[in-house]
Image: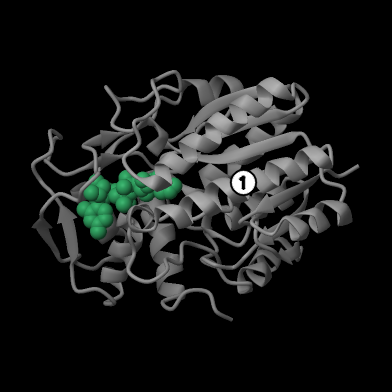
Amino acid sequence: MKKTILVTGGTGYIGSHTCVELIQAGYDVVILDNLYNSSKAVLKRIETITGVLPKFYETDILDAEGLDQVFSENHLDAVIHFAGYKAVGESVSKPLTYYQNNIAGSLNLYETMKRHQVYNLVFSSSATVYGDPASVPIREDFLLGPTTNPYGTSKLYNEQILRDLSKAEPEFSIVLLRYFNPIGAHHSGLIGEVPNGIPNNLLPYIAQVAIGKRDYLSVFGSDYSTPDGTGVRDYIHVVDLALGHIKAIEYAFGRKGIDAVNLGTGHGYSVLQIKDAFQKACGKKIAFKIVDRRPGDIAECYADTTKAKEVLGWSAKYDIDTMCQDSWRFQSQNPDGIND
Ligand code: WQD
């Protein structure tokens, strides 16, 4: 009997890539999304890639009745919870919106799961829960926080809520996946990252410089204690990340309780190294200017990948050149995003 997975935020960047891999791994997928940061057109793209058009509900996690309807109309075996606002800078200027959506909305989801006795959950967390780490690579048993923005804080609070839920309701099986820096796109070029407005993140910004939508890349600081002075991050291919979710769902089905796992490559790349890798992938010069540091940024952040290998039997396999090539293919094939 096929298992059915509810994917909240399933038309989004990481969500859509995870839906493709879930379908191709033999799962039935139900997508719930409020389309705040994505387009319904992604559903047809998922069908083009997989041959399957996922069942879709245009629902907001803040709509408790709408959530209940999804659970009443489908026999769900597990939930992968991506839905949430995720722009670090925006979260600083709109903290109440971020806490309302990312925490109150998530509480609705967890209560609905409990009411419908759906006990398997994979939660989309983030390396931001580590704050500014004492050292790198970062292990899951590192101290958490203090976080440097409401987005990161909402992820940390969700993790705490889920730890408390797991203690009170032992039948739950919860996996917290802490993503590092997801980039790249499905090799078909049909799905990928479509930023809202001016990109906050490095890769989509560089991609827009490459297609001439932006004049140059502003490099936020070159005086960090890193090899070339620019920020170092653990960039991971979004398809590797999606495959990590398949392993996490299988891990959740086989146990009870709660566990946190890093999803990264274990390698750090600087801003200038990424700029150079993207130049190689797109064959164009990426103009850049060194400017002041961005408030809240840290120098270095990359994962210890030991636990992911041990408990999930998963490790990232795509290299930085593939990440940039796949990102460039999507960007050049979809200069105005996914709107068909
Ligand atoms: C990467 C590096 C910047 C833009 C955030 C969230 C994290 C996750 C990924 C959701 C840094 C530098 C960036 C630019 C630059 N999001 N940079 N010029 O801040 O590591 O992580 O996004 O899950 O949770 O915290 O990613 O891509 O914004 O920055 O120089 O125009 O690129 O200073 O060193 P970040 P990023």
Asked if the residue at label 1 sits under 8 Å from ligand 1, the reply is no
Percent of width and height locating residue 129: 41, 34
Given the current orientation, which residue lies at the most extreme bottom position? 340
Percent of width and height locating residue 4: 81, 47
- Disc 1 marks which residue? 106
Quadrant containing the N terminus in the rendered view: top right
Residue at the spot 33% in from the left edge and 33% down from the top edge: 131
Colour option used: one colour
Residue 247 or residue 99, whichever sits in front = 99
Residue 320 or residue 216, whichever sits in front = 216
Residue 202 or residue 167, whichever sits in front = 167
Image vertical order of residue 71 relative to residue 336, above or below: above
Residue at the spot 51% in from the left edge and 39% down from the top edge: 125
Give the residue type that dot 1 points to.
Ser
Residue at the spot 50% in from the left edge and 36% down from the top edge: 157
Image vertical order of residue 17 relative to residue 303, above or below: below
Image vertical order of residue 335 relative to residue 29, above or below: below
Percent of width and height locating residue 143: 38, 21
Q: Secondary structure at mark 1?
A: helix
256 vs 141, left or right, is right
Given the current orientation, which residue lies at the most extreme front position? 96
In the figure, residue 44 lies in which quadrant?
A: bottom right
Residue at the spot 25% in from the left edge and 34% down from the top edge: 300
Residue 200 in sight here: yes
Percent of width and height locating residue 180: 41, 40
Residue 316 in sight here: no
210 vs 62, left or right, is left
Count every numbered label the image shows and give the total: 1
Quadrant containing the C terminus in the rendered view: bottom right
Given the current orientation, which residue lies at the most extreme right position? 1
Disc 1 crowd, CA 10 A, few/some/many (<14, 14-19, 20+) = many
